Image: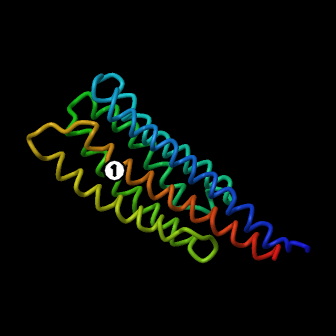
Amino acid sequence: MTVRPAHSALSKQEQWLKVYYFARTAFSAAWVAAAFTVGQQSSSIAAILLLTYPAWDAAANYVDASRSGGLAENRTQALNVVVSLVTTVAVVLALLTSMNWVVGVFGAWALLSGLLQLGTAVRRWKSYGAQWAMVLSGGQSAVAGGFFIAQALLPTPPSIANLAGYAAVGAFYFLISAVWLTVAGLRRKSARTS
């Protein structure tokens, strides 16, 4: 059976998204584990983790956009790269002030990057599977951002554990998307061979 070029390109892109979503899952799961363990015992490690998370998001969005037609064709991801890089710098400054400021910065970032992720998923919806989970993830991230901003205004100082739950939910959504694409690919392959 000959594979049409358009179908082949779509399959390659879905294969890339599957790898990308699994990579995002693995990173977030490792980050959450570190945040709940060593991140709560050492303020230096917590600071490194807090800087790493938005920096990783910037890198991941950049690589995904590059593999998906470039930054010019993926404006929501291009904006997400900028927002995540600015957030990384803002976290450095916030760490010099207080954890409340850090959570406030994370809140603004979660809100903005969540809306941008939602925009990316909506744009991809017609072409690729598993985008419903990315839409939910983006929407939930935006809502969580609002909660973080409110939490930052409370007198009780938050900790990295407050942010780890957010990252865990993100990992779960990326895992759902990766598994969804894997199952869909196996079903298509089975349908072609039968």
| x and y, in percent, of residue 177 in the image | 54, 62
Going by the image, does 75 lie left or right of 36? right
Q: In this view, does 98 lie to the left or right of 67?
A: left
Residue 188 x/y as whole percent: 72, 73
Place residue 92 in its image quadrant: top left
Residue nearest the observer in this picture, 107 or 82: 107
Name which residue lies at 57% across and 46% down: 23
Which residue is painted at 37% across and 65% down in the image? Answer: 139
Residue type of the residue flagged with mark 1: Tyr
Position of residue 80 measured from the top left corner of the image (x, y, whole percent): 48, 53
Compare residues 100 and 181 and report the one nearer the observer: 181
In this picture, residue 185 sits left or right of residue 46: right
Q: Which residue is located at x 36 percent, y 35 percent?
A: 50
Question: Alpha-carbon neighbours of circle 1 within 10 Å: few (<14), some, or many (≥20)?
Answer: some
- For disc 1, the marked residue is 166
Query: In this rendering, does residue 31 appear at all?
Result: yes
Q: Along the line of sight, which residue is nearer the eye, 83 or 55?
A: 55
